[in-house]
Image (cartoon, rainbow, N blue to C red):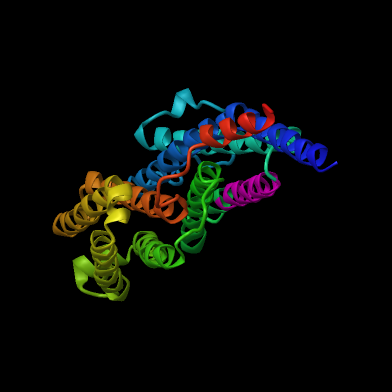
Amino acid sequence: MVFESNLLCKILGFIHLINNQLYKSKYLTVFKRLGSHSVLALIALIVIGGATRVMEAGLACPDWPLCYGSFLPFNHMNLRVFLEWFHRLDAFLVGVLILFKFTLSIIWKNEIPNWLPKTYSLLLFLVIFQGSLGALTVINLLNSYAVTGHLLIAFLLLITTISINQNLENDEIEKPLIWWRFLLFVPLLLTLIQSFIGVRLSSTWSAHICLSSNKQCLILNTHKLFAFPITFSILLIIATAIYKRSLLTRNWKYLSALIFLLFSQIVLGVLSLETNLNEPIFIIGHQLNASLFIAILTTLIFRNPFTKKGLDHSLNSQMVGINL
């Protein structure tokens, strides 16, 4: 009786493991690929949105969701119209991609983790909210708070998408390092606040007013001051990783990218001010760096900081156990 019970447990365990392997080879692969495309599309969306704002093209299409009453306004096309039109097109594609992932999660809900459809429903809500804010920026003629909220929701979409991707990778993580995640969360939060201040800075024209007449400089000075705690928090993370060599060995590519982005972000910020914000390439690069900075910090927060155990060994052990 004991022998039969043990055999049944091993057979059930083997069936569960086979189902898990099928999930990993089929459904997991699809969601990972779609997730990678979503991250790239969201970063492009944020950067194009920044370029649209810098080039003062936010109202280049006077109506919404179409542009001059058509999907492709050939008769009105110029650089500003193209930026606003392409920004909307990318936002539409991001929405379709997220809707597609949500639909697949509902269709495959019996074969995938329970948390996945729920998280995709949150993504779908965020993208609908994002589209609504995009409409408000046109209807309310680029209201500063609508523009700021529009960017922050885009960052939330990026953070949520990356967290999903990393959780799909780390379904076998043993125990997350809470203190490591906290260290990484601090610069992530500070960068989001810095981005909020930056959008307020550009959408209220405070930077131009400050640089031209030395008035309304509070927002600009606050934006510059926030660079110090962000820099300190990143250097603390690097020092901690060097002290804990296993963290440095596993994450050195991401940490190296953080250092590079940090100093290039400072350089781009200084160049933007030195040129009185008249060189769009510096400001757009500043926005791109911020997006990549947030993406890498989020990846480090949610990824397994150590090497995962292989699955083949557990599969082989189950097969050996059944072969009595």
Tell me residue 280's x, y (percent): 25, 46
Magenta residues, dominant SS class: helix
**Residue at left 32%, top 72%?**
219
Tag count in the figure? 0
Most extreme residue toward the right is 1
Between 109 and 135, the residue placed more toward the observer is 109
Magenta includes 131?
yes
Residue 69 visible: no
Residue 144 visible: yes
Magenta includes 141?
no
**Residue at left 71%, top 38%?**
13
Is residue 294 shown left or right of residue 268?
right
The quadrant of the rendering that contains the N terminus is: top right
Q: Quadrant of residue 236?
A: bottom left
Most extreme residue toward the top is 74
Most extreme residue toward the left is 274
Depicted 165 relative to depicted 78: above or below? below
Question: The magenta stretch spans which residues?
Answer: 114-133
